[in-house]
Image (cartoon, rainbow, N blue to C red):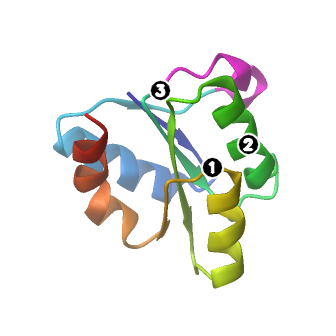
Amino acid sequence: MVAIITRDFQLGTRIADAVAASGGESYFPDMKERDKLLADLAVIDLDDASPDPIELIQQLISQNKDSVVVGCSFRVSKGLRDRAVAAGCSLVFTKSSLPKNISSVLGSIS
């Protein structure tokens, strides 16, 4: 199961479609209940301002050490990538490349 955490409707739809095309399932969790997040993979939009994506990554990893977190951003700078990886992100993609690569990500966690 893939949890998609973004406020970008188009991005979320593209990721959900790519997950479905790869034979997976996805959902958009209610962020008020993020402590109940149950997913093998969480995709987090690093461009969202609230909740803070770096804090959210840390929270997800602290709740479930086996979770895989992938971040995405319109533009991935070295600083953003370093902060996301330090927080617990396994991978960081640009928003345009993530839907194209989601099948590889899903294959690596199954």
Nearer-N-terminus badge (1/3): 3
Question: Within 10 Å of the Cα at label 3, are there few (<14), some (14-19), or many (20+) other Cα atoms?
Answer: many
Check disc 1 and report the residue beneath it: 88
Q: Nearer the viewer, residue 75 or 7?
A: 75
Mark on residue 39?
Answer: 3
Residue 41 in percent (x, y) is at: 44, 37
Say which amino acid is labelled 2: Gln
Mark on residue 30?
Answer: none
Residue 37 in percent (x, y) is at: 60, 22
- Asked if disc 1 and disc 3 are in contact, CB closer than 8 Å, the reply is no
Query: Is residue 9 rendered to the left or right of residue 110?
Result: right
User: The magenta stretch spans which residues?
Assistant: 30-39
Residue 39 in percent (x, y) is at: 47, 26
Instruction: Name the residue: 72% across, 66% down.
Output: 83
Say which amino acid is labelled 3: Ala
The CA span between labels 1 and 3 is 15 Å
Query: Is residue 32 rendered to the left or right of residue 97?
Result: right
Q: Is residue 33 magenta?
A: yes
The CA span between labels 2 and 3 is 15 Å
- Asked if disc 2 and disc 1 are in contact, CB closer than 8 Å, the reply is yes
Check disc 2 and report the residue beneath it: 58
**Predominant SS of the magenta segment:** helix
Comparing labels 2 and 3, the label whose residue is closer to the camera: 2
Say which amino acid is labelled 1: Gly
Residue 44 in percent (x, y) is at: 59, 50
